[in-house]
Amino acid sequence: MSGIKYKRILIPNKNPQRHFGVDFFADVFTGSFPGRKYYAAPIDIDQTFSDDLPKPKTDIMFLFKQEIAQKPEGSIIGFCRNPDPYDQRIERKELMREFLKLVLEHNMGVYVETTSDLIYDDLDLLKTIQAKQVAVIAVPIGFSNDAVGNKIESYEPSFNTKIRFIHKLANEGLTVGVIIKPVIPFINDTEANLKEILRRSHEAGARFVFPTFGIHVHDEQRVHFHNLVDNEFPGLKNIYMDTYGMKQILVSGNSVKLKKAFVFEAKRLKIAFGMKDTIKSIKPNTETQMKLF
């Protein structure tokens, strides 16, 4: 082994009932998801940003093999999206396949948050894992209107592309769902947006749709976020300053109304939407006691 030494690659989830049943988060890449420069969603585990290009950590396969062998069978290993584990910029694209092979070898489940079709190369492994344990794919969607979404997330696939992505994964028999994020006050925090994401995700075969109702803007992100908003939505920066000042948590002023509308629509569509129900749909034998949001 050589280079930087990392304290831990598989980080215990202190409360698996709060993030889709994940037991250990796999911290296997350096670099960041592009959007983390501006904000994070409340549900995001790693809310930090790095300018470095995404790449595997030093000696990552040795460390991953070493640590996963020490974890209990049946554990769910989570690959979250900072950076996207299937990020096109990662040179060693075969790494996720190697990680999944080890998850399967040790009789564990997996949670992957991604919008990248590179995951199609690993469908065989994901289906084998699901047959034995759990394989969950979470797709983040914040905008049903690409004209608005492209101003904030120009690097993201279009809304229709994400819906086709969900449909493909669902048709393969995988457990796939949606995290509605980002929901940014004064930009996409509308009933129409949430309902359209719900409806189309349900039609595509999503098993769950989990909502968020705001963003986190940390001190190092605020200048970038305000510059982005000021460039794309002139005048909105002043509204943010008047409404939120220097607060790091920007909750939609419509959140109460949005939650009511979202719950009503999700129940009408009969799709899991709270974390408790989502985890039950993923791990039917799990007993959880928690709030809806």
Image (spheres, helix red, strand yellow):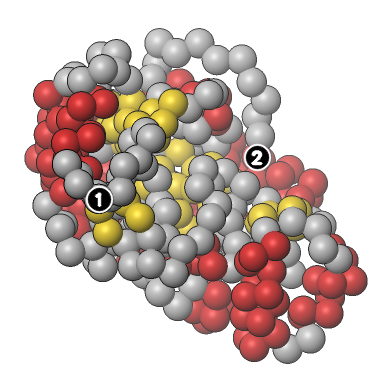
> For the residue marked with disc 2, what is the amino acid?
Val
Q: Is residue 136 left or right of residue 240?
A: left
Helix, strand or loop at label 2? It is helix
For the point 17% across and 41% down, the residue is 1
Helix, strand or loop at label 1? It is loop
Residue 21, above or below 45: above
Q: CA distance from mark 2 to mark 1?
A: 49 Å
For the point 20% across and 47% down, the residue is 2
**Which disc is residue 3 wearing?**
1
For the point 50% across and 11% down, the residue is 287
Residue 4, above or below 126: below
> For the residue marked with disc 1, what is the amino acid?
Gly
Q: Is residue 185 left or right of residue 60?
A: right
Name which quarter of the figure residue 40 lies in: bottom right
- Name the foreground residue: 4 vs 203: 4
- Name the foreground residue: 212 vs 106: 106
Q: Mark 2 = which residue?
A: 263
